[in-house]
Image (cartoon, rainbow, N blue to C red):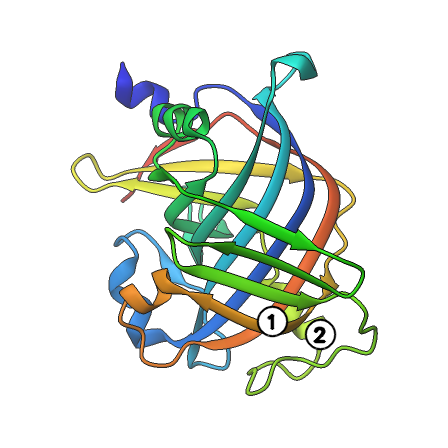
Amino acid sequence: MLNYLKNHPFAVEAFFESSLVFTFAVPKEELQNLIPECLELEIFQEKWAFIAVALVQTKDLRPKGFPKFMGNDFFLIGYRLFVKYTNNNGKRLRGLYILKSETDKKKMELMGNIFTHYNYTTTDITQTDNEFFKEIYSVQSKFKVIINKTENNISLPKNSPFTDWKEARRFAGPLPFTFTYNHNTKKVLIIEGVRQNWTPQPLEVIDYQFNFLKNLKLKNPILANAFIIKNVPYYWKKGKIELWK
C-alpha cells in the first residue's frame, strides 16, 4: 500500500507565489552516474548537462478539486537534473529527475514522503526582502542566495554556456515531466505537470552557495542561468507507470 501511495495516485494542485530557479552547467560525465538507466541527460553543445536548484514559495497545495482551505503553504527547495525519457510509444519526453527535496514544514516532509519518492527533509528557511535585494538562506542546509531586485538590464552569469536569455530559457524549469524509476521492477513513474502564466524573468545573482552541490563532489559547476517566475497556478496529473524495455 505504501508503494502505491508514493506513486502519485491522484492529481495535486497548488499556487506558486514565486519560484527562483538556479541552473548549473556541469560536464556531462560528472552527472551521468546520478541518473537511472532508463533516463538520458539533457545535453547542450555535446558537453554540458544541467542540475537545477528551485526555491519555491507554495500556497494551497492539496488534491486537485479540493477547497483551498484544505491546502498547505510551505517553502520548497528542490535539487533536480534535466533529463529525457523515451516512453513505450517511442515519444521522447523532456523532464526532471529529483535528487532531493527540502521543506520548511514537518507536515510537508511527512506528506511528501508518503505520496512521492522525492526524499523530503525539513530544514530552516529565512528570507529577508527590501526594495533592493532579496536573500534566502538556511543554516542547517548551508545554502544562501542574494539577488538584485533593481537591475533591469541583466546579463547572463559569467562563463554561462548560453549565448542569450532565449537559449537559457530552455533550461528554466520546471519541465513538463518528472520521472522516478524502480530499479527492482524496471518500472518508470511519469508525472506530468500543467502550468499557467509561465513567464520566467532573468535574475541578477549577487551571491550564492549550495552545500548540496559541494556534497556531490562536482568539480566546478557553472551558474548558467537564474530566473524568477511569479503567481503560477500549477497542478500535477495522476502518475502513470510503464515498464521500461
Tell me the crowding category of disc 2: few under 14, some 14 to 19, or many 20 or more residues within 10 angstroms, Cα based.
Answer: some
Residue at image location 72% in from the left, 72% down from the top:
166
State which quadrant residue 143 falls in. Answer: bottom left
Residue 241 occupies quadrant: top left
Q: Relative to residue 224, is residue 241 drawn left or right?
A: left
The CA distance from mark 1 to mark 2 is: 8 Å
Residue 165 badge: 2
Nearer to us in this view, 41 or 129: 129
User: What is the quadrant of the N terminus in the image?
Assistant: top left
Residue 61 located left or right of residue 24: right
Residue farthest to the bottom? 159
Total of numbered circles in the picture? 2
- For the point 23% across and 39% down, which residue is it? 186
Label 1–label 2 contact, CB within 8 A: yes
Give the amino acid type for the residue marked by disc 2 in the picture: Trp
Q: Residue at x 38, y 53 (%)?
A: 141
Q: Position of residue 214 (x, y in %)?
A: 32, 69
Q: Position of residue 70 (x, y in %)?
A: 61, 13
Q: Nearer the viewer, residue 64 or 104?
A: 104
Q: Which mark is residue 113?
A: none
When the figure is inspected, residue 63 is found, relative to residue 172, above or below; the finding is above
Q: Quadrant of residue 161?
A: bottom right
Name the residue rendered at 55%, 87% in the picture: 159
Sequence-earlier tag: 1 or 2? 2
For this rendering, which residue is in front, 99 or 7?
Answer: 99
In the picture of the structure, the residue carrying the numbered disc 1 is: 225
Question: Measured from the top left, where is residue 173 in percent x and y?
Answer: 59, 55
